[in-house]
Image (cartoon, rainbow, N blue to C red):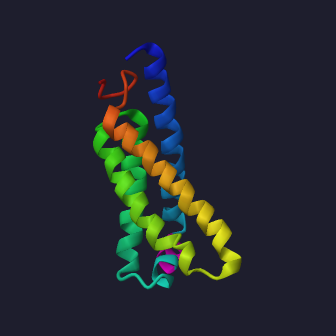
Amino acid sequence: MTAVHDAAALLGRILLAYLYIPNGFSKIGGFAGTSGYIASKGLPLPDVGAAIAIAVEVVAGIALLIGWKTRWAALALAVFTLAATFLFHNFWAMPADQQMVQKLMFDKNIAVVGGLLLAYAFGPGRYAVDKS
């Protein structure tokens, strides 16, 4: 990889982590709301689900940011995001007035999964704890 590629990999990791780390921390402060939202979707054990979401977003998000175990962090976030996309942004089952926004969220998440899979495939670059 060239220095430009390594800089792009770093910037990509920063931008992807920006989606997860702040959201994970906000779920800690809003745990009851997060758990309630999960319960509203009919999912079992909403408190456990909220705790898992926090752990994945914060821990894997930070790992991705600093480039530590990047491939595993990216894969964990990709699986998490794909599951969350189908569970929480199922636009096809929403009322017509909610479909457009939920479709945008669905599409955005699918694109993010694509970026995470690129991080999984190509690693963190040299500007990382685990240099590749």
Residue 34: within the magenta?
A: yes
| x 53%, y 64%: residue | 29
Work out whether residue 45 can be spotted.
yes
Q: Where is residue 47 in the image (x, y as percent from the top left)?
A: 39, 76
Q: In the picture provided, is 68 more to the left or to the right than 26? A: left
Dominant secondary structure, magenta:
helix
| In-front residue for pair 129/112 | 112
Q: Considering the image in quadrants, where does the C terminus appear?
A: top left
Q: In this view, does 11 lie above or below 15?
A: above
Q: In this view, does 19 lie above or below 3?
A: below
Q: Considering the image in quadrants, where does the N terminus appear?
A: top left
| In-front residue for pair 53/88 | 88
| In-front residue for pair 29/5 | 5
- Residue sticking out furthest to the top: 2
- Residue sticking out furthest to the right: 97
Question: In which image quadrant can residue 43 be found?
Answer: bottom left
Residues drawn in magenta: 31-36
| x 53%, y 69%: residue | 89
Q: In the picture provided, is 75 more to the left or to the right than 6? A: left
Q: Position of residue 50 (x, y in %)?
A: 42, 70
| x 49%, y 34%: residue | 12
Residue 117: within the magenta?
A: no
Q: Is residue 33 above or below residue 107?
A: below
Q: Where is residue 85 in the image (x, y as percent from the top left)?
A: 47, 65
Work out whether residue 70 can be spotted.
no
Q: Position of residue 117 (x, y in %)?
A: 37, 44
| x 38%, y 72%: residue | 49
Q: In the picture provided, is 24 more to the left or to the right than 77? A: right
